[in-house]
Amino acid sequence: MFSEMFLQIEDYLVYCNTKGLSKKTIKSYEQTLKLFERYCVDKNIKSFNKVTSKTVTEYIDYTKERGKYTAVSNDITLSSNNPENREDYGKRISPLTINSYIRNLKAFYSYSQEFELTKNNPMSKIKQLPHTRKQKEFITDAQFRILIQSFNLSSFSEYRDFTITNLLMDTGMRISECLLIKLEDIDLKKQSIFLPFENTKSKKGRFVYFSQQMNIILKRWLKYKDVYTNSKFIFTNQRGNPIINSVFESNFRKYCSRINLENVSPHTLRNNFAKRFLMNGGNIYTLSQILGHSSVLITEKAYLDLTDDDIRQGYQNFSPLSKMKMK
């Protein structure tokens, strides 16, 4: 027999799916809730109605102490996953990760209250843990030039990945959005790409824009690609099938290792686009729309971590006195 808590979690996951949330988001909710359910069962708490703020606080303290991968929602997975073999097994769980658990539990209890499934909301007084944000990795102009020059453009896959890498840096798209672009989505004259709602994290369609230099790269890639495949997708393997995120991410790590570029991922290119956009005079509101964030507050939290050197350089570009025409 399934427990009341288990069934309520399953109903919530179905609800999230009907709301059009991404698979990654739903998976995060599932992991958080089932780990919390396991904790509650061990404490002989058999209903979400019986959970109190004290329960949640004690769970957060327990999570801080237990270490990574030392708790699972299902013992059956232990034999197949062997978490103890991981290099980071038992290491401290970061405040950032714990805060994501707190957000997920808050979302679940908001849903439960909205549909009158619980009488109380134990998350109402639970606050996020304070933490120091790690500054996002930045790729210099020189590093990016070296990276681009490391691609073997006589290889179909590397020419494709060369084009993707340039496009991510030039537009700020997510890799998941980029890999699903079709021919019909690109307007080479207006230098724009339409991202349909079903391909975006926010589930809202939007346009992104690319430079004249990127326009030339795209035209050359499309001409090259057409020799090998007539797929409706822009970025495919030679059989015409679209490539998946993990394939490009693995390839990208290989290219970076060639030039000893560490701690860089495809998402780093999106971060670099955002920072460069702001440093070149773009405003945070336009950036928020380009990136597809649901709120400008998300953009501010994610990308307003400019260093003193960034601020100094920005000031020199926009100094009022230097812009004045003095006689």
Image: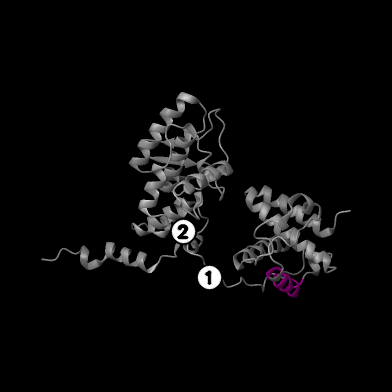
Indicate the amino acid at tag 2: Glu
Q: Compared with residue 327, is residue 235 higher up or lower down, i.e. above or below? A: above
Q: Compared with residue 13, is residue 223 higher up or lower down, i.e. above or below? A: above
Indicate the amino acid at tag 1: Thr
Q: Which residue is mark 2?
A: 137
Q: Which residue is mark 1?
A: 132
Place of residue 231 in the rendered image (x, y in percent of width and height, measured from the top left): 52, 28
Judge from the rendering whether residue 279 lies leftward or rightward of residue 122; answer left or right: left
Place of residue 74 in the rendered image (x, y in percent of width and height, measured from the top left): 79, 55
For the residues carrying marks 2 and 1, which lies nearer the camera in this image? 2
Secondary element at image label 1 = loop
Looking at this view, is 129 or 109 the one in front? Answer: 129
Looking at this view, is 153 or 318 the one in front? Answer: 153
> Which residue is pictured at 49% across the width and 25% down the height?
228
In reply to whether residue 322 is colored magenta, the answer given is no
- Report the Cα–Cα distance between label 2 and label 1: 15 Å
- The residues colored magenta run 52-64
Sort mark 2 into few (<14), some (14-19) or many (20+) by Cα contacts within 10 Å: some
Looking at this view, is 71 or 318 the one in front? Answer: 71
Q: Earlier in the sequence, mark 2 or mark 1?
A: 1
The secondary structure making up most of the magenta span is helix
**What label does residue 69 carry, if any?**
none
The single residue placed furthest to the right in the displayed view is 1
Place of residue 226 in the rendered image (x, y in percent of width and height, measured from the top left): 46, 26
On the rendered image, what quadrant is the C terminus found in?
bottom left
In reply to whether residue 57 is colored magenta, the answer given is yes
- Marks 2 & 1, CB-CB < 8 Å contact: no
Q: Does residue 20 appear anywhere in the picture? A: no
